[in-house]
Image (tube, rainbow, N blue to C red):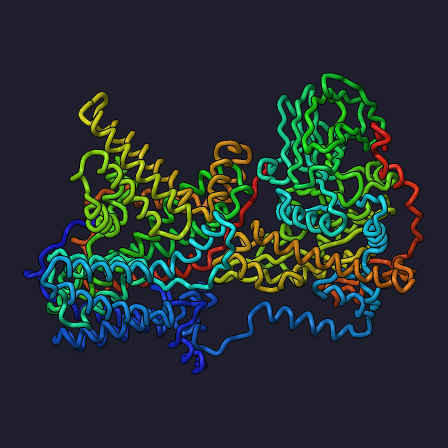
Amino acid sequence: MIDIDWNSVLHQLLYDAHNPLLFNNGFFVYFLVAFILLYYLFRKNYKHRAIVLTVFSLYFFYKASGAFVGIVILSAFFNYFISNLIFKSKKKSGKGFFLFWSIIVNLGVLFYFKYTNFFIEVVNNFSDLKFDPLHILLPIGISFFTFENLSYTIDVYRGEIAPEKGIVNYLLFLSFFPKLVMGPIVRAKDFIPQLKKEYFVSDSDFSRGFYLIVTGLIKKLIISDYISVNLVNYVFDGPHLHNGLECLVALHGYAIVIYCDFSGYSDVAIGISKWMGITIPTNFLSPYQSKSVSEFWRRWHISLSSWLRDYLYISMGGNRKGKFRTNLNLFLTMLIGGFWHGASWNFIIWGAMHGTGLMINKLWTALFGKIRILPKAITNFIFAIVTFHFVCFCWIFFKASSLDTALQFLHQIVYQFTFDGVYEYVDNYKYVIIMIVIGYLIHLIPDSFPEKVIERQKRLPLVYYIVVMMGFIALYSFFKSAEPVMPIYLQF
Amino acid sequence: MVLANEIPYSSSMNNSKKVITLILVVTIIQLSLSVFSSQFIDYYPYFKNVNLLSDVLVKETPQKEIYTKKCKEIKTEVGDLPMNDFDAYEKKGTLIRFNSDTLSPALQKFNEKLIALSEGKNVKIRIAWFGDSQIEGDFITQDVREQLQNYFGQQKGVGYAPLTSISSDFRRTAKVVTTGDIKTDNFKKQDYNAGLFFSGYSFFSNNLDVNFQDNVRKSSEQITQKWLLFGRGDSIAIKLHDTVRKYPANSEFNRVLIGSGVSNKVKFTVSSKRTPIYGISSEPSSGIVLDNFSFRGITGVELKKLNSALLAQINKSGYYDLIVFQYGVNLMFKPNDTNYDYYYRAMRPVLKKFKDNMPNTEFLMFSCSDRAFNYDGTWKTAIGIDSLIATQARLAYNNDIPFYNFYKSIGGSGTIVKWADSTVQYANKDYIHFNYRGAKAVAKTIFTAFINDYNKAVKLKKANLPIVSQKTIPTKVIPTKAVVKETLIKKIDTPKTTTTKPDISKGKENIQKPTEKKVDSL
């Protein structure tokens, strides 16, 4: 009936660079089952439970990123010890000294892996020196766990928390597998205390976890992947091959792709954590409903924006040093935040644009904030539209592989815009367009709706959850082999 | 979707058992379905995407391997056919002339002229490079041109540029800015029923200001000629430096020298109500000219729309030494297509038309490059690609046209996936087009193949052996691999007879000294 290839079984257990572990790998199912069984078995003893969770998290990291798992372990040890040194230092200068080294080492590692080649390129472009780029692979999740380390040592320095006594708990905080690859960025002071509590999943946690996992997977694996593969990727790779209309639709498609991809992953991470009795704060709150750029950043990647606010903006002086410095701090925070997303000028430009957007936002509010001409609903609608399009405009720089490509993309929209061939276009991309529309409709669902679903689900028997999960698997299987939509390269 | 803050759990019962039960039940159901998947996979084929055992089961032979195996079986069965020469089409990195004599170059007169050029003679070698969106914006060709021009005399020039096209503002090597009303006919839309040029375009305008700039880097002393190319009509008026001159348009292909000097720019006004304007050519007075004729979304069959009279006229003048056909990716629009006989039937008369009308020109046929499709969630090279390349090779073989296995030369199966998915991308995510970096890389590969061929000619010349081989091919018509069996019974073609090509050197003389002649009605 079935013929198992035991070599393949063995191969599955090892890291495969071509097939790193993600939530949608078949292997993840086995991983989750083995993990949850042991986790449940050791539910009474939080230390044992933490060890199980740590071992599985490190194994997840190994399956996702290979030998780089060593960096997480070393990083955990380093920060564990240096945070204790910061804590034990009696004098402020001593604390500052160790914090300084914590920042240097954490950022140094991040810079080495993420930014070395960018700076080599900058030096090569702006001088006569010609360095060869280095072959450096980026360890998965390094941007996230670097920020987690920094927030931890800074919190210890500020005296907000005492350092964690158990190294295992700290290692687990860094490597906790649900949030390892794409966040959210969690804070030790929120996370570690939960490890020491009883393994408890309330009715609401169970229902919420289920809702988040299923909707998160739909957003990521069905909506985002479908639009991405069948339109967005190839338009952004070769904008010159597509007219302005195609580029514009692809841009609006990308706005959904990045939201569904990122928030979908966060939702799954939060949902799985819920099922482990651990609460991770919400990371996305329907960001495209925002009516201003500053509201957008309160709704988009909240764990990052709050990190930037607490550890960068406030550290630079925040709004305590006058209007000019406030604006400058705001701008620099976004600029650095942009650069955190990736080592290219495009991310810097993207960050600068958002920084500028925030400054204009502040100025606008100061000048016209109290003036009401139109009814509030209309004003809100106009502001939401303007904010959304500003965000979309910035996405061009975020998504394009180079500045040239971004400018070409803009050029196509401005100078090559045509409705010629629109019927062919709609006919070819009808399913992609439907998917984009679904993405926006999901986004517009009122905030109260998920709460109602979660509340109602609580009363339903287990069989309901099984049927829905099986339904999702069937849907996923269908979309995984959906006939790809080929570019039509409209000319006429 | 927004989720509100947490609800305190103290009042609720612990659902941790429910979590583990749900995960276990769903996994057991899914695992059971995977074990028994063979029983229902025909009814729900998508299940293979979520089969939990698919990674650990003994693999069945993939579809492509089955197909290739089948091809080999068919080949063995027809072992009595003289397939060896034809099989040469699978060679990579070299231009193929389908004969066992690997010492002779595939291109002959072309290489003779290259040798003459390298010896410092005043020779102009012109290449027409047909292609689809892969070469749009002068991609690939700009790099091949640059390398050929660097290698042979450093005389630069962009060659042909249309007055306008979908990719004109993207093209880096030339810039044409036009002001005024412009009407266009092209392969897809022939409102004015004008004769089309090789580019697939023709333009008309009552009054059109044209600003042309050749952006190919050249030495500041090099003189570049700027020609306006146009077709048959009544006449054409060109205003240059405030002087209007009228030129007759009696021939299918005419050209006027509108500028010659060290400047890379020319500005003029053209009025041409009934005469199709073809475009501009910016070229050195001697050296290599490579004209990019890209037209998005086509397969080469569209070239049948070019008038025989135009081809004959161009041939008469010896304007082109070499014509390259680089098509194929647009034929693979369905992931599971494996039979391209329809393409053979459609393209064959096109090639015949070129061959019949342009005996003075040599031809070179490229195979398609790599193209991938998403097969069950994984991007892989199109399963029909071997069949398409065999079909293209068969077209080349049966029309006595040298062949270049572009696909194999750039790396063969899996190349485009690797290039699109690598951190430093060489191809776009449509798994069809090379990006700027990839185009440069493939151009280098192509250039190397040209130089290898050239070096063969050089060796023969040094050994005082004739470069132009007397051996002509083919003697048998070769069917595609996929249909070999069928054509064993029913021959679809008759053996080709060979003709002696006339001497072209006389016709070329007129072109090589263009400065002496301001109007060149060819």
Q: Is residue B284 visible in the rendered structure shown here? A: yes
In the foreground, A283 or A314: A314
Task: Estimate the x, y position of residue B425 in percent, counting from the top left.
Answer: 51, 55
In the foreground, A326 or B68: A326
In the foreground, A311 or B19: A311
Residue A262 vertical position relative to residue B34 in the rendered view, above or below: above
Residue B157 vertical position relative to residue B273 in the rendered view, above or below: below
Is B413 displayed left or right of B30 in the figure? right
Q: How many marks?
A: 0
What residue is rendered at 57% in x and 63% in y? B414
Task: Estimate the x, y position of residue A439 in percent, counting from the top left.
Answer: 35, 46
Is B8 displayed left or right of B333 in the figure? left
What residue is rendered at 27% in x and 31% in y? A381
The quadrant of the rendering that contains the C terminus of chain A is: top right
Give residue B32's quadrant in the image: bottom left
The quadrant of the rendering that contains the N terminus of chain A is: bottom left
What residue is rendered at 9% in x and 63% in y? A90
Give residue B236's quadrant in the image: top right
Q: Is residue A210 visible in the rendered structure shown here? A: no
**Most distant residue in the bottom direction:** A6
Task: Estimate the x, y position of residue B111 in percent, counting from the top left.
Answer: 82, 54
Is A454 displayed left or right of B311 in the figure? left
**Most distant residue in the left direction:** B11
Residue A166 vertical position relative to residue B337 in the rendered view, above or below: below
Task: Estimate the x, y position of residue B172 in percent, counting from the top left.
Answer: 60, 40
